[in-house]
Image: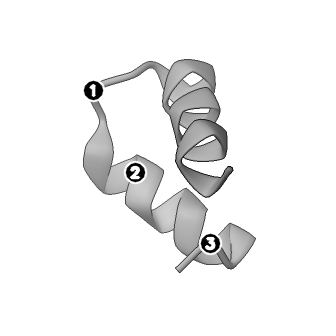
Amino acid sequence: TIKLHVKTLYRKIGAGNRTQAALIAKEEGLF
């Protein structure tokens, strides 16, 4: 699922940095 993918992204970049995670998710085309 997308939620699971986002959680994986959070872990990869160091969970907690939601701003950067959101930017990465945008680039990945998740939303």
Q: Pointers 3 and 2 in contact (CB under 8 A)?
A: no
Q: Residue 6 shows which numbered tag?
A: none
Percent of width and height locating residue 24: 57, 59
Task: Say which residue label 3 marks.
Answer: 30
Task: Identify the amino acid type marked 1.
Answer: Gly
Q: Is residue 28 left or right of residue 4?
A: right
Alpha-carbon span between mark 3 and mark 2: 14 Å
The residue indicated by pointer 2 is 20
Quadrant position of residue 28: bottom right
Q: Secondary structure at mark 1?
A: loop
Nearest to viewer (mark 3 / mark 1): 3
Res 9 quadrant in image: top right
Q: Nearer the viewer, residue 17 or 31?
A: 31
Quick one: label 3 or label 1, which is nearer the N terminus? 1
The local crowd at label 2, few if under 14, some if 14 to 19, many if 20 or more residues have their Cα within 10 Å, is some
Residue with the mark numbered 1:
16
Kindly report the distance in space between the C-alpha atoms of the residues bearing marks 3 and 1. 18 Å
The amino acid type found where label 3 is placed reads Leu
> For the residue labelled by badge 2, is the local secondary structure a helix, a strand or a loop?
helix
